[in-house]
Amino acid sequence: MDLADLSAPPRPKEPTLNAEPAVQRRLLDLQDLDLQLDQVAHKRASLPEHQALKDLIAEKSVVDRELVTADTEVSDLQREQKKADSDVEQVRQRRARNQQRLDSGQVTSPRDLENLQHEIGSLDRRISDLEDSELEVMEKLEAAEVVQADLRTRAEAFAGRQAELETTRDAALKELDEQRAQLGDKRKAVAAELPENLLAQYQRLREHNGGIGAAPLVGKRCMGCRMELAPSDLNAIKAAPPDAVLRCEECGRILVRTSESAA
Ligand SMILES: [Zn+2]
């Protein structure tokens, strides 16, 4: 035990409340409804679809990012390919013009003919080089398109799976919301039967005691803390008037006497 506990002042005594035994037992119904509502809230928060969606979206975002990179790469290469195509085309046209001049017989000077033939030769080499780079770009583009298509398929599969999970999750949430609404209506009706001060005490105790503010006395046991009461406490309970709202000496929760109680 901590030394601070020894010196701590005793808890201020709350006023003893009174309520008819039937009203006190109604508090147990309220407690039961509150626990069911807690369960619904817990189920709502811990649907497996929540985690599955979180994991899926994390994986999907990686693929989506890779797809953006792949799209950029493909469009860059497409531009490069167009440039390579037009480069080859330009040189081909120039070569064709030279060939035409050569074939036309208009060029007669041997020196000019030699120059023309020489230029055609170098244009042929240039065309061959450009065709090589054109081919290289085309191969790169094809490879990039394969990567892009694969990523697109994967991204679509992720999107499909995400939509499925969202549908399942929404259906589960809708069902839980309906349960919550039904329980909420019942709770409201029961709470309306209880005096305000008893309800307030119960709420406060429930908040500080893991969701259980009131428990029945079953045999000699408080079902809130599962402790068996001391004989002296049981005697005090026996002596208490039926409308006295009792508290468990062990856990402090409201202790409700029922037909199953030993006192
Ligand atoms: Zn107790």
Image (cartoon, grey):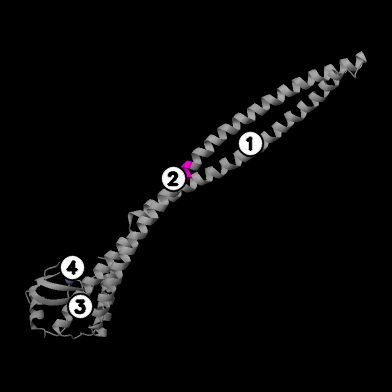
* Of residues 64 and 234, the one drawn nearer to the viewer in this rendering: 64
Magenta span: 153-158
Query: Mark 3: which amino acid?
Result: Leu
Farthest residue toward the front?
104
Residue 210 is left or right of residue 169, and the answer is: left
| Residue 253 visible in the current orientation | no
Q: Nearer the viewer, mark 4 or mark 1?
A: 1
**Residue sitting at x 38%, y 56%:** 167
Front-lying residue, 213 or 171:
171
Label 1's element? helix
Q: Is residue 76 above or below residue 201?
A: above
Residue designated by label 1 = 77
Above or below, comparing residue 149 to residue 216 in the picture: above
Q: Earlier in the sequence, mark 1 or mark 2?
A: 1
Q: CA distance from mark 2 to mark 3?
A: 52 Å
CA neighbours of label 3 inside 10 A, class few (<14), some (14 to 19), many (20+):
many
Residue 231: quadrant of the picture: bottom left
**Whole-percent x, y for residue 179 in the image:** 28, 67
x then y, percent, for residue 74: 60, 38
Which of these two is toward me, 226 or 203? 203
First in sequence, mark 4 or 1: give its number: 1
**Where does label 4 land, which residue?**
225
Asked if residue 199 lies in the magenta stretch, the reply is: no
